[in-house]
Amino acid sequence: MSVSPRFISLALVLGASLAVSRDAHAQTTAPQEPASEAQRTTNATTPAPPANAASANGVTQQAATNDAAATARIQALEDRIATLEKAEAKAKATAAAQPTVTATRDGLNIRSADNAFTFRLRGYVQSDARFFGAAGPVAPGSSTFLLRRVRPIFEATAYKYFGLRLMPDFGNGQTVLYDAYVEAKPTAALNLRVGKFKPPIGLERLQSATDVRFIERGLPTSLVPNRDVGVQLYGDLAASRIQYQVGAFDGAPDAAISDGDVSTGKDVVGRVFLRPFATLASAPDVGLGVAGSSGKERGTLTATSLPSYKTTGQLSLFRYRADGTAPNTVIAQGRRTRVSPQGYLYAGPVGVLAEYVRSTQHVKRATSLAALSTDAWQVSGSWLLTGEHESFTGIAPNHPLDGGSTGGLGALELVARYGVLTTDADAFPLFADPTTQPRQARAAGVGLNWRLTRGIVFETNYERTRLYGPTAATVRSTEHAVLTRLQVGF
């Protein structure tokens, strides 16, 4: 049983006071030394007061004096202890009200004492190198070094239920605002997001750029918007076994980033994704879903609202006719729809991701109208040679190269994929030039990823893209690309 310091102090003072009282009593009642003969004669002739009365009076006065002193000391000690207790309580309250600041592998975090307000700073840099070769009459792309992405990320929470995210990008010699949104998150089942962010369509597009298995995303990602401005409701149901998103957006073209709309038409976007084993830790992570969008777009000669596609090596793949004149420029004119069945499977060290996208757009050139569709699909596989668990959201090496007591050499991952993109045959020759634009691209890639830590990765990919024209006269080459990347993130 613990005894409070205040009780101990009071007991000590009271004990001291009682000791003083006993000493005084002993001195008063102790036997006196024998008196001299003269003193005895004087005492014999002088009437003496009653001995018992005088002795009792002295003891009473001394005890009263000692009690008063002890009471004063006790009161002074109580006042001092009360003052110290108040100071201690105030110090504890002040310390509890101070925010906490931590720096970890997940970034710099500042959190209020009640967790109602948070601020997080993190980011990543991806430094790439590209080396090209080609078989055919068309010269390959220029080999180059570049800063592919330089992205600081600012995230904040206010009053527990409201969030903010800002993510600019300084890569490729440009400054582009990729994410800028606010959101309300009252429950896991119902959340609201407003601003600029990824429309929920492409599966690989929804993966963070730090988590994708290849240096560049596959061909189906070319057919979904990159970033758009809009509003979205989203949430998790049935213990995260069902995920949904539904929203309205300005309507960015395929693979494009939009900061506004050139027409009054808007895109309605929806996605449902099922993870039946989400609550079973020992089961494989299986996800199946479908996403789609629908809206109307009307382009102009200066803003056609039509896409252009790139290979996995980021070279030009396909574009519509456009020279800035009304007779020879193709523009969006009417409804655009997208549909994308998608899924993944992650079991132990092995993962597979597959998706298909079909994008259909009504277009116009001069007085000619058409509804043109472009299809793309891919299957991507990964295998962690060092035995870690594959995941859609990223990989944490069992023995990271971080200088810790359990440090090691990180994780090695082998990846491979195959994908096809096919444009509409009706696009040729009126809406696209058959002598320079291919009808189909078939891309195969392999790679080895060395994940030193969760945020530091060295990647090497080989990509082979073979292009097929709508006619035998189409002049295209087979593209060979070796891509490397050093990623540092926190």
Image: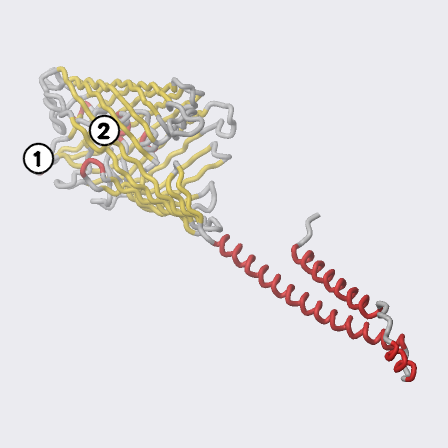
Q: Quadrant of residue 372?
A: top left
Position of 443 compared to 10: left or right?
A: left
Instruction: Give the residue at x 67% y 54%.
Output: 4
- How many residues crowd mark 1 within 10 Å: few (<14), some (14–19), many (20+)? few
Side (left or right) of 156 relative to 307: right
Observer-nearest of 481 and 293: 481
The three-letter code of the residue at mark 1 reads Asp
| In the foreground, 124 or 261 | 124
- Residue 316 in the image: state x and y as whole percent: 16, 27
Q: Closer to us: mark 2 or mark 1?
A: 2
Q: Is residue 472 left or right of residue 487?
A: left
Residue 292 visible to the viewer: no
Disc number for residue 29: none
Could you say which quadrant of the image residue 451 lies in? top left
Task: Say how many tags the image has.
Answer: 2
**Sequence order check: which comes first, mark 2 or mark 1?**
2
List x then y, in percent, for residue 483: 23, 23
The quadrant of the rendering that contains the C terminus is top left
Q: Please name the residue shown 47% across and 23% down the image.
A: 284
Given contact means CB atoms under 8 Å apart, are the residues at marks 2 and 1 in contact? no
Colour scheme shown: secondary structure
Residue situated in front as seen by the camera: 1 or 107: 1
* Residue with the mark numbered 1: 323
Q: Position of residue 216 (x, y in %)?
A: 26, 27
- Give me the disc on residue 128: 2
* Residue type at tag 2: Asp
Q: Secondary structure at mark 2?
A: strand
Residues 105 and 315: in front is: 105
Distance between mark 2 and mark 1 Cα atoms? 33 Å
Above or below, 103 relative to 133: below
- The single residue placed furthest to the bottom in the displayed view is 46
Percent position (x, y) of residue 59?
81, 72
